Amino acid sequence: MKLIIAIVQDKDAHVLGDEFVDANIRATRLSTTGGFLRAGNTTFLVGIEEERVEEALDIIRENCQSREQYTTLPMHLDTAMDSSMSFPIPVQVGGATVFVVPIESFFRF
């Protein structure tokens, strides 16, 4: 058994969840928040047989695409100044961060 931990952007979560259901892959969804953009993410926890790991990774790969988005980050011009200016900058968002870890035991009650 393996545990797949997939952190995906909220925009991709619904489609990915549907694809997991269609493939008969059980997944638990957790609402999470990213650190850099403080944007909503969804973390999927998937307990899966070792021979189906590649199938699950393919589903994630096909449904979680990265894209460019503009965001504004505060830029302080002078540390003595209280005001800050914001400039839009392009950042890559989306895609998926995936961890595959071995499971010593797996129980379903």
Image (spheres, rainbow, N blue to C red):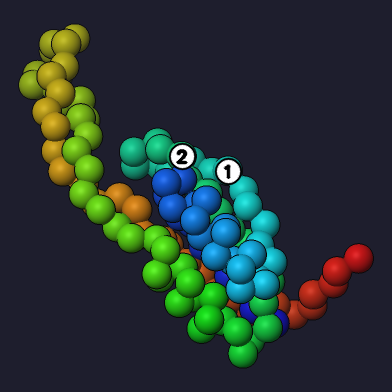
* Mark 1: few/some/many CA within 10 Å (<14, 14-19, 20+): few
Q: Which numbered dot is residue 40?
A: 2
Q: Is residue 22 left or right of residue 73?
A: right
Q: Residue furthest bottom?
A: 51
Q: Is 12 located above or below residue 98 in the figure?
A: above
Residue 50 figure quarter: bottom right
For the N terminus, the image quarter is bottom right
Q: Residue furthest right?
A: 109
Q: Is 53 located above or below residue 18 in the figure?
A: below
Q: CA distance from mark 2 to mark 1?
A: 7 Å
Q: Secondary structure at mark 1?
A: strand
Q: Is residue 65 left or right of residue 45?
A: left
Residue 75 % position (x, y)? 15, 26
Residue 74 figure quarter: top left
Q: Is residue 83 left or right of residue 13?
A: left
Q: Secondary structure at mark 2?
A: strand
Q: Residue at x 29, y 57 (%)?
A: 66
Q: Which residue is mark 1?
A: 31
